[in-house]
Each structure stands twice: as C-alpha cells, then as structure tokens.
Image (spheres, helix red, strand yellow):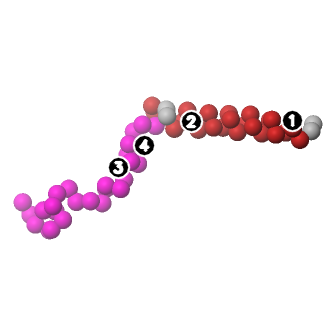
C-alpha cells in the first residue's frame, strides 16, 4: 500500500463523514433542537420594558 492509496482512502472516509454530518444537521428530527438552541441568547431578556424596570402592570 503506497501513500497515494492511503490518501485516497482518507479522502473517501472524510467525504463519508462530511455527508453524515450534513445529513445529521439537516435532518427534520433535529429541527426542534436547533430552534431551541437558536433562541438561547434571548432566554435572559425580560419579556417587556416594564419587567426590565421592575414595575408591575
């Protein structure tokens, strides 16, 4: 087995890994998890300006 064969095998394995990650990331089963993660930066913000000032409505 020469170096070119090892490089070819490595390339094919990396391509398969890339396709696997791509399919995992764009799977419809993961949509809810990614939507929740996308909203995490907003989790600490108050719901209204009144809440931020400490006033009760």
Label 4 crowd (10 A; few <14 / some 14-19 / many >=20): few
Residue topped by disc 1? 5
* Residue 37, position as x, y percentages in the image: 41, 48
Give the mark nearer the N terminus: 1 vs 4: 1
Q: Alpha carbon of mark 4 to alpha carbon of mark 3: how far?
A: 9 Å
Give the mark nearer the N terminus: 2 vs 3: 2
Among the 4 quarters of the image, the one containing residue 20: top right
Give the mark nearer the N terminus: 2 vs 4: 2
Q: Quadrant of the C terminus?
A: bottom left
**Labels 2, 4: front one:** 2
Q: Alpha carbon of mark 2 to alpha carbon of mark 4: how far?
A: 14 Å
Q: Is residue 49 above or below residue 29?
A: below
Main secondary structure along the magenta-highlighted residues? helix
**What is the number of the mark on residue 34?**
4
Residue 10 relative to residue 35: left or right: right
**Labels 1, 4: front one:** 1
Residue topped by disc 2? 22
Tell me what residue is drawn at x 30 percent, y 60 percent.
44
Mark 1, secondary structure of its residue: helix
Q: Is residue 48 magenta?
A: yes
Mark 2, secondary structure of its residue: helix
Give the mark nearer the N terminus: 2 vs 1: 1
* Residue 18, position as x, y percentages in the image: 63, 37
Magenta range is: 30-57
Q: Is residue 50 above or below residue 34?
A: below
Residue 21 relative to residue 43: left or right: right
Q: Alpha carbon of mark 2 to alpha carbon of mark 3: how far?
A: 22 Å
Residue topped by disc 3? 39
Label 2 crowd (10 A; few <14 / some 14-19 / many >=20): few
């Amino acid at each position: 087995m020469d170096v070119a064969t090892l490089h070819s095998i490595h390339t094919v394995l990396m391509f398969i890994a890339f396709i696997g990650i791509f399919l995992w990331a764009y799977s419809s089963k993961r949509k809810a998890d990614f939507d929740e993660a996308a909203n995490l930066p907003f989790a600490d913000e108050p719901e209204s300006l009144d809440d931020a000032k400490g006033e009760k409505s």
